[in-house]
Image (tube, rainbow, N blue to C red):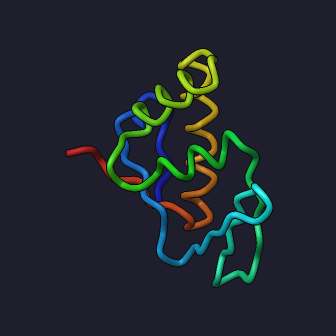
């Protein structure tokens, strides 16, 4: 799976992979990567990004929502979200597709 540069990732639509199960345990979102038999815990910002990565929003839209919810710069959020989505895409936890 190809990774995307920050310049174009804002227009990409992330969608959670069916091969990655997730559950909220005691307020923490836990990803279970079934093929690797691995658990990953997400902090509250990463959890919110994961929740919004449902295939209906671009990463730019997700970053704007996070920036508003957590009162931080949208540029910083987009850069951080881009890195996070690229890491998840490299692991196969999300797919990134071009927006329609």
Image coords of residue 33 (percent x, y) = 66, 75
Residue at image position (68%, 74%) is 32
Image coords of residue 23 (percent x, y) = 65, 69
Does 54 appear above or below 37? above
Count of numbered badges drawn on the protein: 0
Image coords of residue 37 (percent x, y) = 74, 83
- Between residue 15 and residue 51, name the one nearer to us: 51
Does 5 appear above or below 22? above
Left of 31 or right of it: where is 89? left
Residue at image position (48%, 62%) is 16
Does 67 appear above or below 37? above
Query: Which quadrant of the structure image shows residue 69?
Result: top right
Residue at image position (41%, 55%) is 54
Left of 46 or right of it: where is 85? left
- Which residue in the rendered view is the most extreme toward the front? 26
The quadrant of the image that shows the C terminus is top left
């Amino acid at each position: 799976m190809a990774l995307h540069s920050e310049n174009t990732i804002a227009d990409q639509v992330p969608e959670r992979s069916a091969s990655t199960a997730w559950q909220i345990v005691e307020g923490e979102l836990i990803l279970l990567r079934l093929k690797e038999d691995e658990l990953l815990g997400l902090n509250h910002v990463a959890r919110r990004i994961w929740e919004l990565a449902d295939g209906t929003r671009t990463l730019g839209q997700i970053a704007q929502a996070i920036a508003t919810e957590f009162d931080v710069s949208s540029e910083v959020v987009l850069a951080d979200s881009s890195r996070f989505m690229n890491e998840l895409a490299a692991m196969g936890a999300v797919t990134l597709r071009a927006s329609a």
